[in-house]
Every structure is written in C-alpha cells, then in structure tokens.
Image (cartoon, rainbow, N blue to C red):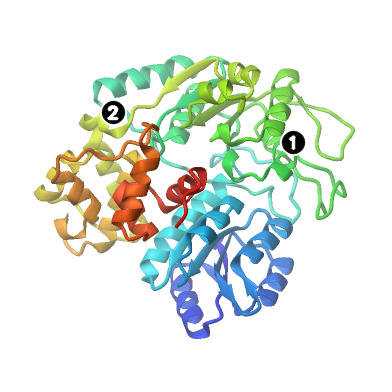
Amino acid sequence: MKKRILIVEDDIAFGKMIMAFLERNNFEVSLCTTGKEARDHLNKNTYELLITDLKLPEDSGLALLDYSKKVTPSTQMILMTGYADVTTAVEAIKKGALDYISKPFRPEELLMIIEQATDLVIESSSKVEIGQKKPDNENNHGLPNRELSRDPGTFINGISEVSKKFNEYLKLVGPTLMNVLLQGESGTGKEVAAKAIHAYSSRSKNNFVAVDCGAIPKEIAASEFFGHVKGSFTGAVNDKTGHFEAANKGTLFLDEVGNLSYENQIQLLRALQERKIKPVGSNMEIDVDVRIITATNEDLVKAVALGKFREDLYHRLNEFSIEIPSLRDRKDDLFLFTHHFLEQANEALGKNVIGLSKQVEEAFKRYAWPGNLRELKNVIKRSVLLTNSDLIPLDVIPREVLVASNTETPVVDFSKESNEKQLIINALKEAGNNKSRAAKLLHITRKTLYNKIAQYQLKS
C-alpha cells in the first residue's frame, strides 16, 4: 500500500512540484494551501506523514502540529521553511516534529528525509515483525493499531574482537527470560541488537514490538502502552490494542526509555510487577507475558542519582546489560557494514554501484564515525544517489567526512559531557549561527543539535 502524505504549502507552484515528484516515487499525495484545508483533510483521512510550511496565511505549521497530534496521533510531521529560526525548530521538535528542512532544497534531499521519517513514523508507534501475528483490534482511524511491518536491518556478525564479544553476549542472553538493557552511543544499532536477542529466544515466533518512548507524549502514554476502550476519552471512537497486549508472548522493545516521564515510569513498573494491564476506560485487567528489552544512550545510573529515573524500575529493566560498541571501536568491521549498506542503497534507489574508490576507502578508514552505523548508512545512501559510475568517487562524499579525515583534530565525542556545551557554542559561532552547518561540524543531526540547544538553554 502506498504511503499517504499531506503537503500544506501556500506557494501553489512549489507545492505542485513537490507533489508531482513524490507521486513519481510511489507516494499517494494530497496538497492544500491553507491551515483550514489541512484540518479538513486530517479530519477526513489518515496520513503517515504531514509536510507543512512553517508560515501559512492566517496559520502556522506549529498550530497544525498541535492539531494533528489531537486528531490523528499516528501522523508525523516535517516542517519546511525559508525562515530558519532555532527557537521555532526547538519548539517543533519538542512537540514531536520529525525534522526541519530549510528552503531552498532539492527534491532528492526531501525524498531521503521522507524515507527516514517514514521509518520513524513506524518507530514512534509499534511495529510487528514481517510474517508475525498482528492484533485484530483497530485504532481510532480504522487502521490495524498502527502496527506496521518493517525490517529495520539484518544483523551483521562483525569480525573484530569487540564484535565477537558483543555477539556472544547476545547469544548468551537471548534464550533466557531476563530483561535486557542495551546501552551505547546514538546510532549504534540498538533495535537491530534487540531483534537479534528476540531471534535467539524461544519467543522468536511471536511478536517483536518496538516503541520509541521519546516520541510518545506523556498525556497519551497510558493509551499507547495499555490500550483504551471506545468512548474512554474524546477521539476514542474504537477500541485500541496497546503495545503490551500486542507484544503478549513476545518481546517489547522500549527505545530511549530514559525519556519516559516519572508518572509513566510508575505505570510501566506496575505493569512489569503485576504482569497485568488495564486499558484506559476499562475495569478489566488483562494478563500479559512480555519480555522487555530497553535501550538508551543516556546514563541511567546518573538519572537515578538525580531522581529523574526510578531506581526500582532501573533494576527491573537491567537484569542483564550489554554495551553496544561504537563503530570507531570496531574498525575491522567497517567495510562489512559498508558493503551491507551499499546493497541496501542500491536496492532502494535502483542503482548498481559496486563499491568505493580507493580515495574514499582511505577517507572512511581515517574518519571516526561519531554518528556510528546510522551516520555510515546515511553517508552511503547519499553517496550512491549522487554516484554515476561503478565506484563512489571522492567528490560525492560529505565535506565533514573529508575534513575530519584529513586533520588530527579529534572528532566531537558526545559521550563526554564536560565540554559538550562549549563545543556546541564554538560550532554555532564558527557556522555563523547556521544550525545545519553547525550540526555537520559536530557530526550530529539537526534534531540532536536542537535538543542540545534546548537542554543547555542556548540563545541563537
């Protein structure tokens, strides 16, 4: 089924150009020019993705974001604007926007963002592995509870010593019933590791349901986790199956668990202790048998000490912990992953790029890959898109990879928090307060930069 996108753009010519391009790429696209039209569309239809201009006649993209969250929570949003404003960007992302793209942009750039965002649409709800059982209940919009099938990636057994030890841990804990806490830097592949644990377990024939805790507003978390009954609150026009019930007899993967509010932590702990859930608006308890795998790139021990994360919940989740190695610590595996992502990019883009040129191989070897596997995958996909030969040439590689590869200046390491704030300030100053450029200098995504700016209360 084609993914449905709603575009809100008051520049009709520009909107039609985007619409035509996305339709050629097999999306089902609707276009409107005002916030009122957009609200009518959202009331009558369900969309996987909403792409809206920030500045609209008598309206704003932020107002549409708020409205969309109320009437169709499964719809995710990308903001596009020629008015780059970090305050608005931070506010949008804090409210749940996926990304923020500044005009002018190439349609190919938007397509890559949309493809990544489509994955995030699935991650922000729950996902059931291909070929596995799906719940019968439908959500408010007549869809199968937003539990879409997706394969986030094949697990690659590395050949480095650190990878061999990591793989042994996965195989060791997989067959047990222990809850597992996966720790590591952003982009190291925590969901792929969680799926590997699930595959090694006796639950492998049952559902693997993944939830991005950072994408769930605390106000609807109970409904997302435990479901609700028809009429329990405004907009609950059908019964809804929650993540716990969807994962019954299987595995529930909670990504970025440190982002849960304290109240939501209490609800989660109660469900784990009692092995029962009660849908919102229901008086009946439902027995659930769920194995929990959690992941975070935060220091939960520090969060416990600061009173931000419940100690009893931490110990309940951390029956066995695994540290996922960074890509710079498994350089012997670099070209195994490169080949894997190259095959994926060729298939996704309809290309037939064979490999890397010698110059690119050397640049890859020297680069520290602070964004880990996610960064490598994105660099490969972008490079394949721009390559018109058998081998990826040097001139299509992002500048930050080449610059970092040809300097002895250490790459920013966001696992070190002591100088993180100053590094961000320096990068913003060097980039002339251009947030996209500063994010590239820091080797992080714009979304991460906006979150850090908000965290440290930095002014543009």
**Residue 158 tag number:** 2
Q: Residue at x 64, y 44 (%)?
A: 216
| Circle 1 residue | 226
Q: Given the image, on which type of amino acid does mark 2 rest? A: Gly
Q: Residue at x 17, y 45 (%)?
A: 405
Q: Secondary structure at mark 1?
A: helix
Q: Residues within 10 Å of mark 1 (few under 14, many from 20)?
A: many
Q: CA distance from mark 1 to mark 2?
A: 37 Å
> Where 24 sits versus 153, above or below?
below
Q: Secondary structure at mark 2?
A: loop
Residue 95, x across and y down, in percent? 61, 53
Which numbered circle lies on residue 332? none
Residue toward you, 237 or 310: 310
Left or right of 11? Residue 341 is left
x and y, in percent, of residue 221 in the image: 70, 40
Amino acid type indicated by mark 1: Phe
How many residues crowd around disc 2 within 10 Å: few (fewer than 14), some, or many (20 or more)?
some
Task: Compare residues 300 and 275 and report the one nearer the observer.
Answer: 300
Residue at 32% x, 28% y: name it: 157
- Residue 233 locus on image (x, y percent): 84, 49
Residue at image position (74%, 38%) is: 222
Against 348, residue 196 (above or below) is: above
| Closer to the eye: label 1 or 2 | 1
- Whether residue 431 is situated above or below residue 206 in the rendered picture: below
Which quarter of the figure is the N terminus placed in?
bottom right
For residue 265, what is the image quadrant? top right
Q: Earlier in the sequence, mark 1 or mark 2?
A: 2
Q: Residue furthest right?
A: 283
Q: Quadrant where the C terminus lies?
A: bottom left
